[in-house]
Amino acid sequence: MHIENPFYSSIQTPYTQTNIAPVANMQRKEIGDQAIWTLSSAKAGNGVDQLRDDNLNTFWQSDGTQPHNITIQFLKKMRVQEVALYLDFKQDESYTPNKLSIRTGTNIQDMKEVQFIELKEPYGWYVFALKTKLLNGQENGKDTHIRQVKIFGPREKQNQGLSFPDFKTPEITQYASIR
């Protein structure tokens, strides 16, 4: 997995917190459906499907010893820009992670930590600029709840590799219509 992250050198906070769900836009698209998702453990009825269903009332619940892992693996090289997690300490209390390790690599064996984050009573969407390892829960809870995960990559230019003109140049945009 190739991680595109040109802002690591200048980033002040290793994440952005928001109460608004991150969505695909002109610069990015959600690419999680192109990945193979693996969880270190899960209680029955609280697995990958619930983690990815766009419903903040459902969640993944781990069922085993720490650390808990979410592994997002692509079958081909992908450009990943960010990962977003929805956490809710108000509902999940000690099940809410408070220490996260963001790891990236080209395969499972060469994963390297690129960010370590500590959160105090997190609530909302946390957007990280990629394997996310949950090192510890709030109040040293054994298992964990994560309500949603989204993964975003850059949008590719539509005419990539083709010889179509760039319709945003001044030479072309000066005309009201093109035939």
Image (spheres, rainbow, N blue to C red):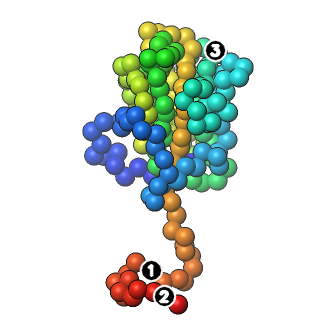
Q: Where is residue 175 in the image (x, y as percent from the top left)?
A: 39, 88
Mark 1 and 2 residues: CB-CB less than 8 Å, in contact? yes
What's under tag 3, amino acid-wise? Answer: Gly
Q: Which residue lies furthest to the front in this view?
A: 176
**Horizontally, is 154 left or right of 174 in the view?**
right
Residue where numbered disc 2 is placed: 178
- Point out which mark residue 64 bears: 3
In the rendered image, is residue 12 in sight? yes
Q: How many labels does the image show?
A: 3
**Residue found at x 36% / y 19%:** 120
Question: Which amino acid, by three-letter code, is at mark 1?
Answer: Phe
Q: Is residue 126 above or below residue 32?
A: above
Which class describes the residues within 10 Å of circle 3: few (<14), some (14-19), or many (20+)? some
Q: Report whether 66 appears left or right of 7.
A: right
Q: Distance between the residues labelled 1 and 2?
A: 10 Å
Residue occupying the far right of the picture: 44
Local packing at callout 2 (Cα closer than 10 Å; few below 14, some 14-19, many 20+) is few
Mark 1 or 2, nearer chain start: 1
| Residue located 55% across and 49% down the image | 30
* Residue wearing tag 1: 167
| Residue 19 figure quarter | top left
Element at label 1: loop
Residue 153 appears in view: no
> Could you tell me residue 18's position as x and y percent?
38, 36
